[in-house]
Amino acid sequence: MTLQEALVQGTKLLEEAGIAVPRLTSEVLLCHAVRCERPFLYAHPEQELREVEWIHYGRYLHERLNGKPTQYITGHQEFYGREFRVTPDVLIPRQETELVVETALEVGGGARRILDVGSGSGAIAITLQLETHAMVCGTDISFAALAVAAENARKQGARAEFVCCDLMAAIANGSMDIVVSNPPYVPEAERASLQREVRDHEPGLALFAGPTGFEIYEHLVAEAERVLCPGGWLVLELGYKSRDRVLGMFGPHWLDVRVVPDLAGIPRVLAAQMEGER
């Protein structure tokens, strides 16, 4: 079977199964099986697949048809122009989460100490370290997730450190200029309504916050008051329709509370500054 024939067959299978972007998905999986870049498929459509390549491609298609996300099959996801390793132990970094990074860079100019709470793959922490050259620490309750984050930091050449703890429990009072987080915010009641790719394959620890979906936000806001230095910033990704409830968690010690919409106009990031001056 040639590359062109394999691509056509794979696309047809995915399309008939209702998989999103079947052509692109087929291209990515075929490239992963053949160990090539996408332009190679079109420069050499007549090339015959070796038996081992066909076996791998068939397995990848089978996994995707059964709901496994493409990123977990290939083990990679791009974030802020960099490639990150991902496994089922970590949430797949989303493009909309790049707005957390952009907001932190905007409000936290000159920050020397940055904390990323719930680091997962380390995408936010590593990106902020490489963009700012600040001292960056990431925390996560999962040892397995932190192993992925540490591997990504080594590969990216980022000087980020990672600590296993619950939220900010291991972080000293008044020690951080910026705290960022993309926290779990899905209510338990919405588990069944999630896409199977998310519900059945991404880590529940990184998705579900509790009965209301606001439990982790409440802890983050309270703990940030302890961990941030005067004038420091808290930057949070917001869940869908969570803006008003989260805004109500900020008391009189918080100044300049702002909400940043994404390109679709959806409230995506909240940034708030602690009172005082650094």
Image (cartoon, rainbow, N blue to C red):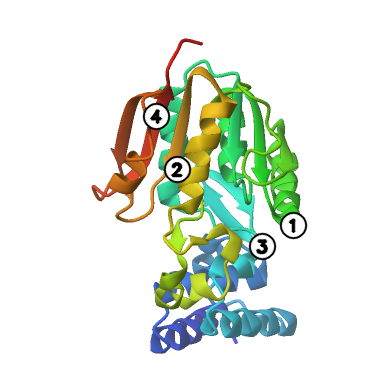
Residue 274 is situated, as x and y percent measured from the top left of the image, at: 44, 22
Q: Secondary structure at mark 2?
A: helix
Please report whichever mark, 1 or 3, sits nearer to the chain's N-terminal start. Answer: 3
Q: Secondary structure at mark 4?
A: strand
Q: Which residue is mark 3?
A: 87
Answer few, some or many: residues within 10 Å of disc 4's Cα (few below 14, many 20 plus, some between 14 and 19).
Answer: many
Answer few, some or many: residues within 10 Å of disc 2's Cα (few below 14, many 20 plus, some between 14 and 19).
Answer: some
Verify CB contact (< 8 Å) between mark 4 and mark 1: no
Q: Quadrant of residue 49?
A: bottom right
Q: Marks 1 and 3, how far apart in space?
A: 9 Å
**Amino acid type assigned to the residue bearing label 4 in the image:** Ala
Q: Secondary structure at mark 3?
A: loop
Please say if 77 is above or below 13. Answer: above
Side of 218 where 135 appears, left or right = right
Indicate which label's residue lies in the foreground, 1 or 3. Answer: 1
Instruction: Give the number of the disc on residue 272.
Output: 4
Residue 275 is situated, as x and y percent measured from the top left of the image, at: 42, 17
Which residue is located at x 60 percent, y 49 percent? Answer: 83
Instruction: Give the number of the disc on residue 98.
Output: 2
Q: Secondary structure at mark 1?
A: helix
Side of 69 where 212 appears, left or right = left
Side of 128 where 107 appears, left or right = left
